[in-house]
Structure formats: structure tokens, C-alpha cells
Amino acid sequence: MLRNRPLPTLVVAAVGLALLVPGTSANAGPVPGTGAALEVAAAPGQTSTIPDWRMQTSATATQSGTVISGPGYSDAGWLTVPARSTVMAGLIANGKYGDVNYSENLKRADANDFKVPWWYRKVFQADPQPGVNTFLKLNGGVISRGEVWLNGTKVASTDTVIGAYPTFEFNVTGLLRKGDNALAIKASPSDPAKDLVIHFIDWAQLPPDRNQGLFRDVDLAQSGAVSLRGLHVLSDLPLPNLNSATATVKVDARNNTGNAVTTTVAGSAAGQNYSQNVSLAANETKTVTFTLNVTNPQVWWPYQMGAQPLYDATAAATVSGARSDEQKTTFGIREVTSKMISGNVQYQINGKPILIRGGGWASDLFLRTDARKIADEMMLTKSMGLNTIRLEGKPENDEIYDLADRMGILLMTGWECCSKWQNTGGFTAEDKRVAGASAEGEAKRIRNHPSVFTFLIGSDEAPVADVEKIYLDALKRADWQTPIINAAARRSSPQLGDSGMKMDGPYWWEPPVYWYDNQKGGSAGFASEIGPGLAIPEMDELKKFLSQAEINKLTDYNAQQYHLSPSGNFSKIGFWGTALDNRYGKPSNVDDFVRKAQLQQYETNRAQFEAFGRDFSDTGANQAQGVIYWMQNDPWPKLFWHLYNYNLATAGSYFGAKTANKALHAQYSYDDKSLAVVNMGLEAKQGLQLQVTVFNSDGTQKANETRSVPAKANGSVRVGNLPQPSGLSPAYFVRLLLKDASGKEVDRNVYWLSTKADTLNYNAGDWWYTPQAQYTDLKSLSSLKAGQVSVTSTTTPGADGRQATQVTVRNTGTSVAFFMRASLRKGQGGAEVLPVDWSDNYITLFPGESQTIRAEYRTSDLGGAAPVVQLSGHNVSKR
């Protein structure tokens, strides 16, 4: 991700998803004892996944691979670690460093421990059968390089197994023994400046091992004379017609023998059967193709535009009537295209333009896979109204792609910045080979997923010409169908031309008005990564990973904060705090700091997404095409760059974005005081009424009017300006209520504004921020008269082990009840329940008003306690 800066030093379940993901975390915790027994399947078409490993440093296990991979070798004293486990993840799972999320405990890890290779070892049982071949499959590389041994024989060396993403397959049939077998993999030290691996740049404090080791599954796959690989389906829609489609099924058939063989490849897809006899010469591989015409296909859409139907595809190979191998996959029928509009890229799904509104994804800092947490994060993503996740240099394991397909969330993938990946001009011949293998391997792994809509072969920089060709050739070999972009920044390359994306910042604080200007990161074109930086969690969360002294230090804006970035630009709160002081008033203590932080985060996050929503229907270069918030989530607990935090707690950042990203939404514009209605659906909405009310800070009405407003399909409409009554208080409120033809409220949006505007100095600043020239004055919000409210709640059971609590808050006083947050507790005074999907939060009510909000969550997350609602507000005491 970040721009034009030196590298940091490299030394030192959602509702409806319960059946799709495990009920507990996968590969994220300790493995008891010496690991699970593994008996490799002997039947063709079967695959056995290594369930866990024994792990040890080569500083202790000094023997050769010949010895360590011997079935009789004693690995007493080795650690048992999960199947997908970097070295650091394995050490953490075994309690080596305590809670590495808390305070500065991560510093307990000694970087010298990771300057030597580490061994992974697994003993398994096998019963080799005549005519059955066994293949060792690495579904991702070994970081940074791997040496692979089986039963005392070297299968591959570090000049073959290189990098994070290339996949490897080795025929180990001749090395298997009846009874005990031992597989050993030696992982070399990792340096993202030297190898094409994974780097966390300035996203968090860096993992001390630089993600050395294994992070994807290792399989042992069986097949007969013929193996099938790479089953995939290409779909084509004759746009704009969606009434028919062509589905092209492809699978590679490989002859594993030294003799010619004839195989029958048969299967089904989209409800149609197919079969073909294939003649293969000795050791030959052929691609077998079936072309299907699908009438009235079920078309896949992003969730705000339609449904997410998925099809199954199967293929089986038989030789002389006996099963030799089989494969299956799922796919969706959809078509993704792109075009340039005044130099900016616009994506279309099934022929319809889409405003990309997403967040930058951060994998777990130690590359652990927690399937349930990923499902929870996808639930929060969808509930927040985001339609896209950007995976910059962290192409996740398969779980996220499967969930995205079913939930209708788009995924954009590609390589990272600021490491070896960016230095394409300095690639060696080996680097080029690894780069091509990485692109081909990743593309083949994810090409069947309809959620994946683009591939960025560069981030901050486009690859040089010869590397661009390597990537494009690799993607062509993988039958990649969706648009390929050369960089997330505004760059050009010989074959792809202009990227159509911009990366002009910011990455730190900007006021709401910033986003509406067409300069820099403002709402024009496709902004691939922008955001206002700080995202301070609520106090409950801060106490989970900061000591009290560290919490108190948050009010020192010039102090280095360990749970910010290792980069100098982002290691201090800095001018974000200056803006807080000038706009809301200097916090009286750290509790006041946290409370005011939520206000500042909410308003600018809402404005960022609202500005792009409003300008989606502009024309030419000013048309908004996409915005990726930097970032969506945390790899490790931190104080910046997230919409929800590491523990999936949602605060001001999240709910500002959630408000802005409603599918049907009325909003205010900070630049020209105009109002707009945004509709992300494909159907226009008729008969809408917009009630616009302006209140002074004491809650008295200064203006109130209702307008008939349109909501065109898949776009925005300006609907006049905000009334400008005289006699406004320095800080005042605006309420927008959008109602349907029956008078039912479909959207509510409350702003707190000032008669003094924020302004910017575009002639100063740097790549990561534009400074303010003047601050709005919202200080009087701290002296609002105390609000009086009543709170009632009811809890009802739901499906899939979930339940819901409805909370009704009524303003029973004569003043505004401002910015009230409800939280769900495990019993009276208990810890907060997480994660919770709130329909809304941080609500503001005017005298006599009430609002009901809904919280959905897993019943088991209560830990047997009764759910208790806690409410507090900016001027409402905690209850």
C-alpha cells in the first residue's frame, strides 16, 4: 500500500452462514499433544490434507533432511502447530510469548530466532496400491523458500520452491512406504526486500519472523493412470441480453504413465451432462473442453444489485471403466467489463455500471486462518454497505472467496507495494520466473469465483514492460477473464495503457469537506486507497490491548504509540489531535478524548463515502467510479486504519461508513450545502418524500420542509439545497428523513454542523495529507444540556444459533440526546458481546422522538449470561 516512502527496517457467522463455516476457529489455536494421526487415502480421486505439523528451529534440529525426514527420527521436544502455520504463529499457539496483542509484548520475540531455517515435520501412514499414484501438493509456496523431503529423499530444493504464491506438485509414488512415512519441509528465513513473499509494510508492527514458514495447506492427492487438474468454467453473456449464456468447461487430463492411454472424461455443469474420450500419449497432458449453451441462466450479482446463484461443475476420469480421478468446483455466471471515462476506470457487472465502495483487507499479522472470524468480518462488511474488499498483496486462503461468492461481495486482488514486488525493474531471471508462477498459481486458484472481478498486477507502480508481459502471459495461461489493471496508482504500461486509478492520498486526518473536492483524494475517478487515518476504539477495547499508562498517553499527540505504525509518518497521533482540539475542544481527559474521537471519525468517514455516492452520477472526469477505504480491518490490535477493530468491535468509524453506504440514502454535501438521494439498486424508487429539518443546538426547530424527491436506479440525484435560516447557533443539527409513498421512514441521517467551515490548504502538505487552513467550530457540543432518555429492550431467538435484541430509545427530555451508543453486555456490568450486527448506532434524537435499533449476535457469545443493553451518549449519562 503506502506511497513514496522508504521500507521499514527489515531486521528487527453471520445469519445464513452457519452451515458454511466451522463453529470454531480453524487453524488458529494450539494443537494438543503430538498432533492428529493421518492415514493417507489409497483410493483414486481422494485427497488427504496434512492436519498439523511438528516444528523446530534448525538451530536445535541440526541433522540433515535425510535424517529428519526418516520415519524413525525422534521429534521429541518439537512443537505441534496448526496445518497452516508460520513459525511465529506456531510459537504463539504454544504460548511462547504470552499475549502478543497486549502492550509491547510482541517485542519479546527475538529477531535472531528467525535468521535460521525452521523445520516442519509430519509422520503419516500409507498403504500404497498398484496403479495408484500419490502427489504431494503445496497449495502455496513456502516463505521464503522451501526444501522438501520425504522418507529420507529430497523431493525439491530451495531453487525450486520459492515465494509465497507459486503452487507445486510432486509425484512421490515411488517414495511411499507401507506403514509409517515422514514428510519434512525446511523453511528459509524471510526478507520481503529480497524475495516475493508477504510484507505488512506500515500496516502494523511487523511480525518478527516476517511470516517465515507455511501458511497454506499441504495435500497428498491420489489418482490412477490419469489425473485431472484445474477444473474451471468460463462464462459469457451476450450483453445486454441476460436470457442466455455460454459456459465453457475446461479441465486438464494428465497421463501419469509411460504408455499411451485412453480415458473418458465426463461430468456435469449448469444441469447439463458431458462426456468425451481422450487419447493421451505417454506423460502427455491435454486440456479437455466442453461448450454448453445455458438458457435463462441464473445470473450472479453483487448483493445490492441482485441474487448470488452458484452452479456446480464436476469432472471424472475413468480408464478401462475404473475411476482414475475426479474434481468438482462451483462457479457463477456473470460478466465483468471495464471502460475508461475521461481517464478513469469504470467497472460494469453484467453490463451495469457499479460504484465500487470497499475497504482494504488486512490478513492476520501471523497469517493464521480463523474461518469463523472471517465469516464474521464478511457479515460486518455487508452490513456496513460495502460491496468490495481489496486484497493488496494478501490473497487470502479459500474461505474468504467462498463466502464472498455466497454473500455477493466483490473482491479485487493483486500484488503489494513497497517490497520486492514493487521493484520489477530489478527482477532477476529467478524473480521473473517466480512472479509468473505466482500470477498463474493465484489466478488458477481463484478464477472460478464470481466475486473476484479484477486483478492488479501492480500497486504503487506498474511493472516494467517485460514483467508486465510475464504477468499477462501467466494470466492468459490461467484463462483469466476479468479486467487486469497495471497499478492502483495513476500509471501507464506498454500493453495495458493507463491504469485509470488514482492514489493521491490521504492516509491521515482530513475534515468532511475534503472528500467533495475533485482535487487529490476527493470524489472523482477511482481512488484505490484513501482514508482519514486514526480510528480510536471505544475504551472497552483500548483496555484489551493497552496498559493504563499507554491509554493515558493517547492525549499526547506527539508521543510515539506502539499500536500505531512503525513508519515515522504514522507513529504519532499528530495533527489528527490538533484538529480534534480545534474542532471539538481539547479533551479534559482520556475518556473525553475517546468520546470526541468517535464524533470526528464518524463524520469524516460518512462524508468520504457519501461524496463518492453523490458524484457517481456526475459526468466526465468528475464522475466518481470507486473508493477503497484505507483500511477495512486490523491484522493486529491498533489505533488507525480500520472500519472495525481487531476484536470486531464497531465504533464511530464503522457507523459513519454504514450510514453513508445504505442502498437508498438521503445525504448532505459539505461543499455546496446541496442535498442528494443515492440509490445503489437497479430499480428506481417512486413516491419518495424527504423531510429536512434544521435544529439549533438547544433542540429548537429553525426550518422544516418536506420535498418530493426522485431516486433513479443505480445513481444519485441532487434534490435542492439545505435551508439556511437566520439565527443559527454556532453548532447546529440537520435531520434528513427519507420516507416512502406510504410514509414509512426508509432512511434517517443526522448531521452536526457549524456556521464556521473547515477549509484546506492544497498548496501545502505531502503525499499522505492535505493540511487544514481553518477549523470548524463544534466546541459548544460539549456543553449541551443533559439529555433525558428512556430505554427498553426485547430479545427474541433466531435461526442458526443466533438471536436478536431490539432496543428502543425515547427522548423524554426537552434537549437533544446526542450521539448515543448502545452496547450489548454479558449480564449486568459484564463484558461487551462481540461481534454484534447493529442495524444502527451512535444515534441522535430530538425532543419527543424515539428510534428502535436491532442487534443480532450468536447466542453462544453470551457465555450463558443474559443480554443486557448499556447506553451512553455525548450528553447522556451511562445506563
Image: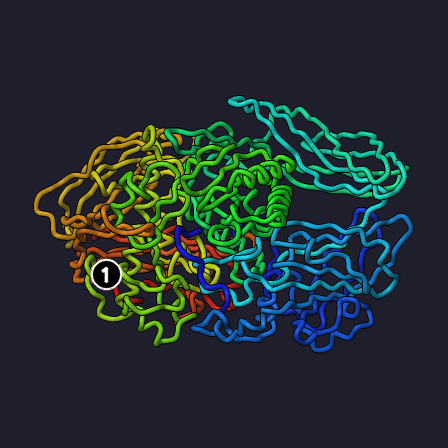
823 vs 630, nearest the viewer: 630
Q: Which residue in the rendered view is the most extreme toward the left? A: 727
Q: Is residue 358 left or right of residue 615?
A: right
The colour scheme applied to this rendered structure is rainbow
Residue depicted at 58% across the width and 33% down the height: 481
371 vs 792, nearest the viewer: 371
Residue 865 at x, y percent in the picture: 48, 68
Mark 1 Cα-neighbour bin, 10 Å: few <14, some 14–19, many ≥20:
some
* Count of numbered badges drawn on the protein: 1
Residue depicted at 23% across the width and 43% down the height: 670
692 vs 28, nearest the viewer: 28
Q: Is residue 561 left or right of residue 21?
A: left
Residue 849 at x, y percent in the picture: 25, 51
Residue 370 at x, y percent in the picture: 57, 59
Observer able to see residue 20: no
Give SS at disc 1: helix
Q: Quadrant of residue 490?
A: top left
Vertical comparison of 190 with 290: above or below: below
Q: Is residue 482 left or right of residue 136?
A: left
Residue 689 at x, y percent in the picture: 28, 34
Residue depicted at 45% across the width and 44% down the height: 461
The residue tagged 1 is 578
Observer able to see residue 681: yes
Q: Looking at the rendering, in which quadrant would you find the C terminus?
A: bottom left
Amino acid tagged 1: Thr
Q: Quadrant of residue 246?
A: top right
